[in-house]
């Protein structure tokens, strides 16, 4: 910072000298709020935890796609002259490891913010820490409702539709389809699972939920399988399965349900509807007719075969993420979240304080090329739910076939 001293100002009258000094200080850029840690004239360092190993490793495609997209952006010159340095570390989907890794990213690696870390239990464990330290927790890869609570957690924001919204969509649809159905529920025993289940009950309404839901089972992410839960749910006599499981367990549930000869109307949450990571390993023939919801274009849908945005995505994958599976919609997810990041950083300009980074994340209005028609990313200071709509889809052959209208908030 430029400094003024008595000798430099001696030739000027004292009153005028004081006025000049004040004016000079006001114009000095160094007096502006300092940019976030990790921001230099040439770099923006950000951090992320991702399950590159462990029970949720199917989601690692998201982190790889984001790293690939950032590599492309950096090759093109970066954002406003700065390259993005994404430090992405493997937490194995273990909350204690997530906390350790996140603290190291913030306190030792000096990242500007945390970007698109994956998971509800893993995100929850650092939720308060990041907010207490006023470190932006941006576009968490989880649909838990507490990423959309700016009043209590103003430094955290999600990206995908929240789980209660999605669960309610299934509940309302089932109520119209078959109000006399007998429903069995299985969910992961964490906040994500409870959010989905709560949304489903909200969609049914309290009276219908009490009457229609006849069996509920949970599983732990450390369980080897959920075969016993599926058998127990079949024994309940249920005609509908509300299946809220992550990819590894979703594939198991689809296989087991089919193999024991149980053929309920099967609702599968969007977090586990990857054709590559779930439907293919489960066996395409075993997943026919399963109902889920989409908000991204499915790369397996021939409707998008000639879509310019999908063609651009395929060209990107072949060049920057060649080992990525073109059938895996998690790669589409990572691509679109990375585009959201780039737009947010562009809006920041040269003000890369943490406060402005958070402000811009809460002031988005963008149409991303691989979101379904009619769905946008929109946020405001009072609305931390970027994506609010989805469309139901049924698994047919080797792809999801959409039906009905775009639904949501």
Image (cartoon, rainbow, N blue to C red):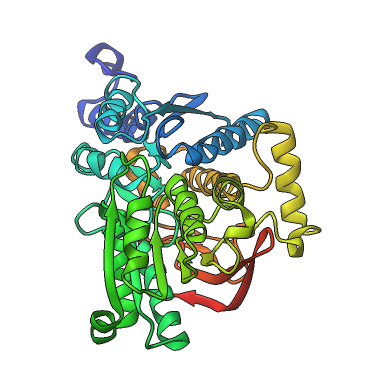
Residue closer to the observer: 117 or 329: 329
Q: Quadrant of residue 56?
A: top left
Query: Where residue 363 appears, x then y in whole percent?
Result: 42, 58
Q: Residue at x 23, y 40 (%)?
A: 125
Q: Where the C terminus falls, by quadrant?
A: bottom left
Picture layout, residue 358 above or below residue 81: below
Q: Would you say residue 119 is visible in this rendering? A: yes
Q: Give residue 117's position: percent from left, percent from top.
A: 40, 39
Position of residue 257 measured from the top left corner of the image (x, y, whole percent): 46, 60
Identify which residue is drawn at 37% across, 88% down: 180
Q: Nearer the viewer, residue 304 or 48?
A: 304
> Relative to 265, is 126 above or below?
above
Q: Is residue 265 above or below residue 333?
A: below
Relative to 226, is 331 on the left or the right?
right
Identify the residue shown where x is 30% and y is 40%: 122
Does residue 146 appear left or right of residue 399 in this picture?
A: left
């Amino acid at each position: 910072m430029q400094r003024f001293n008595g000798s430099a100002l001696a030739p000027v009258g004292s009153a005028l000298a004081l006025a000049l000094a004040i004016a000079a200080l006001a114009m000095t850029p160094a007096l502006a709020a300092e940019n976030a840690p990790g921001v230099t004239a040439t770099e923006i360092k950000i951090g992320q935890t991702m399950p590159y190993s462990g029970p949720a490793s199917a989601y690692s495609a998201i982190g790889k796609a984001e790293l690939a997209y950032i590599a492309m952006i950096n090759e093109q010159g970066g954002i406003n002259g700065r390259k993005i340095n994404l430090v992405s570390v493997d937490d194995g989907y273990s909350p204690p490891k997530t906390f350790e890794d996140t603290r190291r990213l913030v306190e030792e690696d000096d990242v500007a913010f945390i970007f698109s870390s994956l998971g509800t239990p893993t995100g929850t464990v650092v939720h308060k820490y990041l907010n207490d330290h006023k470190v932006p927790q941006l576009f968490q890869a989880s649909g838990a409702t507490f990423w959309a609570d700016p009043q209590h957690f103003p430094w955290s924001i999600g990206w995908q539709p929240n789980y209660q919204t999605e669960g309610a969509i299934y509940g309302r649809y089932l109520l119209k389809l078959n109000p006399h159905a007998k429903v069995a529920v299985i969910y992961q025993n964490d906040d994500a699972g409870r959010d989905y289940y709560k949304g489903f009950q909200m969609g049914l309404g309290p009276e219908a939920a009490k009457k229609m839901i006849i069996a509920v089972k949970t599983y732990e992410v450390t369980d080897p399988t959920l075969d016993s839960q599926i058998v127990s749910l079949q024994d309940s006599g249920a005609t509908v399965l509300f299946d809220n499981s992550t990819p590894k367990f979703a594939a198991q549930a689809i296989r087991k349900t089919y193999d024991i000869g149980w053929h309920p109307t099967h609702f599968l949450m969007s977090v586990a509807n990857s054709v590559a990571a779930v439907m293919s390993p489960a066996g395409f023939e075993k997943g026919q007719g399963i109902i889920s919801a989409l908000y991204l274009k499915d790369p397996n849908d021939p409707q998008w075969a000639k879509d310019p945005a999908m063609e651009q995505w395929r060209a990107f994958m072949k060049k920057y993420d060649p080992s990525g599976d073109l059938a895996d919609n998690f790669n589409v997810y990572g691509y679109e979240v990375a585009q959201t990041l780039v737009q947010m950083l562009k809006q920041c300009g040269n003000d890369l304080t943490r406060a402005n980074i958070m402000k811009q994340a809460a002031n988005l209005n963008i149409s991303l090329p691989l979101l379904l028609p009619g769905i946008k990313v929109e946020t405001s200071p009072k609305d931390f739910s970027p994506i609010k709509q989805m469309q139901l889809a049924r698994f047919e052959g080797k792809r999801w076939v959409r039906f009905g209208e775009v639904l949501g908030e």
